[in-house]
Image (cartoon, rainbow, N blue to C red):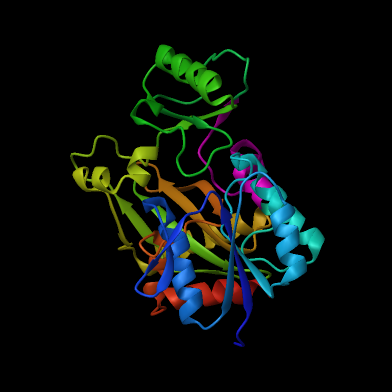
Amino acid sequence: MKKLRVLLLTHGPLRSKEQDGRKVFVGKERKTENDVLGALERLGHVIDVLALEDSLDPLAEQVAASPPDVVFNLLMKFKDDPAHEPNVASYLELCGVPYTGCSATGITLARDKALSKQVLDWHGIPTPPWRLFRRGAKSIGADFAFPMLVKPSDASGSVGIVKDSRVYDEPELAARVAFLHETHGCDVIVEPFLTGREFTVAVLGNKRLVAWPVRERVFGADAVVPFMTEKMKWDEDYQARNSVRSRDADLEPVRASRLQKLARDACRALGLRGFARVDIRMDGDGHPFVLEVNPNPELDFDEDFVHAGLALGLQPDDTIQKIVQLAL
């Protein structure tokens, strides 16, 4: 692949420093940017970095002054609001600039949990039974058994999911729904808590989708909660204390193929392109259900997406190069 001018687009504010003769970004939360930037540098591409906060003017100026061959899009929010994530992708589409990852339409469909569940249900893709509690509406129960899991309908990264998100009776359900309505200002999704194993499947492609080897999330026997809370996802020390880890899934080939097909079908139903991660959980009888479909998942080299590539013999830099190629 020829060397490209790549614009690495992320959210601001972004601080950097010189380390070992190269620029690195400051902050533990910036590991993804550092990993992707390092890969692009090793691949020999010419890289510009732009962090957006509350104006698109810097992006317009950058595109006009030094037109990129491709934008590597790591932007997960704009004006400090994740709801604006697809709008930046739309802007790049209007500018005619190729960019990595999912389209604006796909991001919009996938990040709205209720809408994505409706689409998946229509296509016959198994998802847990669910109910939407809109802001201002009272909780009056759901047509499935406790325990239930309560979560924001429009958040990613396990935001708003805590230990108390698993509820065991009607009063706990009503209290948790009201809490999210008030503190997060969002609609709320409620679904039964599935007690089986949990998996992730990395999916890449545009018209032709390819599912990589299945990864499994394992929760220790003494884990505070056997599901991924916001703290569990982002706090490595907390993960270690609860023996939470990810590994290549130990599955019979037929069952692994079924999960891979389920992931491809879910991405295809939502019109996703580029790269995505599908979260799947089994019930107590071993039946798989799609929990969420995540467009543009984390590319931190310690995360499941990149590790799925390792199972195929692909180094992290190879994965980044594939993502770039899919954008062109």
Residue sitting nearer the eye, 77 or 221:
77
Q: Quadrant of residue 252?
A: bottom left
Compared with 20, 296 (above or below) is above
Q: Is residue 270 above or below residue 114?
A: below
109 drawn magenta: yes
Q: Which residues are magenta?
A: 107-132
Return the x and y of residue 297 as percentages of the image width and height. Answer: 51, 56
Q: Quadrant of residue 322?
A: bottom right
In the picture, which quadrant includes the C terminus? bottom right
Q: Nearer the viewer, residue 294 or 259?
A: 294
Rendering coords of residue 165 (x, y %): 40, 28
User: 176 left or right of 69?
Assistant: left
Please name whichever residue, 308 or 54, is drawn nearer the observer in this view of the structure. 54
Report the side of 199 relative to 47 (left or right): left
- Residue 314 x/y as whole percent: 42, 78
Judging depth in this view, the residue of 243 and 17 nearest the camera is: 17
Residue positioned 33% across, 30% down in the render: 163
Magenta run includes residue 202? no
